Image (spheres, helix red, strand yellow):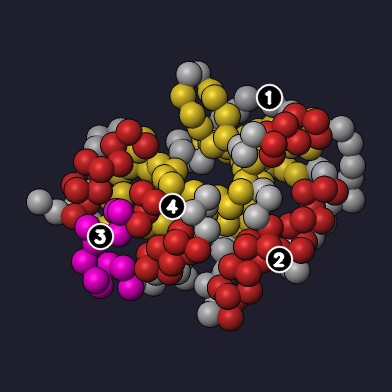
Amino acid sequence: MHFTEKVLETLRGQLVDVSGNGATYKGVISAQQLVEVAKFLPKEELEVVVNSIPPIKDFVELAKREPSTLFLVNVLMDECVIVEGMLIPWDKVEFAKAVIRELKKRHLHPDEIYPAVELEAEGKRTFIAPLIVECKLVGSLLKEIDEDFEESEEEGDSMFVAPWYDILDDMLTGKEYKLTHKEFEELVTKGKAYIMFWWD
């Protein structure tokens, strides 16, 4: 049995068939699940750097350091497992800063840093991220994490503006959706708001 089949078997409840034909699966998993899945991977798979994405062994270490972190994984059947992103709880900004500093030294910093929220959509748990951020609260926090981040000049009651990007389905939702400051703060309180690091 190929190691990707063992990974699929273990994570089936968390994965979405994004290819439609069983070739590629994507999902958001817990830190503990990443640690467990890594045990199925050959040593060379744990250490390989692909497209400036840190090796999986590095993500496993980060998972152990901060167990509340979630990970966006891509499983290419009969090929490999890729960690595309980290979702760090909004209140763990100091951890996020430390991770960025470490990765920058090795030229493995993420391609994108943005807020993401967990929502119930059509009866299923999904994670979505806005393409436009219009909030100084978000902008100033991202600026702390990544000094290259350019803060928006605008401010208003609506923080995130449609269209939204569905992380799991890898597509634009096309839905008109705005999140107010109050709604975002409620999601933070519920532990459903994250700082997302994403590698292309």
Residue found at the very far left of the displayed protein: 1
Kindly identify which residue carries mark 4.
Answer: 31
Q: For the residue labelled by badge 3, is the local secondary structure a helix, a strand or a loop?
A: loop
In the figure, residue 144 lies in which quadrant?
bottom right
Which of these two is toward me, 198 or 95? Answer: 95
Residue 40: x, y in percent? Answer: 22, 58
Kindly identify which residue carries mark 2.
Answer: 146
User: What type is the residue that disc 2 sits on?
Assistant: Asp
- Estimate the spatial distance between the alpha carbons at disc 2 and disc 3, rounded to whole Å: 32 Å
The residue positioned 27% from the left and 67% from the top of the image is: 45
The residue positioned 30% from the left and 41% from the top of the image is: 11
Q: Earlier in the sequence, mark 1 or mark 3?
A: 3
User: What type is the residue that disc 4 sits on?
Assistant: Ala
User: What type is the residue that disc 1 sits on?
Assistant: Glu
Kindly identify which residue carries mark 1.
Answer: 176
- Estimate the spatial distance between the alpha carbons at disc 2 and disc 1, rounded to whole Å: 29 Å
Residue found at the very far top of the displayed protein: 122
**Is residue 41 part of the magenta span, yes or no?**
yes
Kindly identify which residue carries mark 3.
Answer: 39
Disc 1: CA contacts within 10 A as few (<14), some (14-19) or many (>=20): few
Residue 94: x, y in percent? Answer: 68, 63
By secondary structure, the bulk of the magenta-drawn segment is best described as: helix
Residue 162 seen by the camera = yes
Q: Earlier in the sequence, mark 1 or mark 4?
A: 4
Q: For the residue labelled by badge 2, is the local secondary structure a helix, a strand or a loop?
A: loop
Residue interval drawn in magenta: 36-47
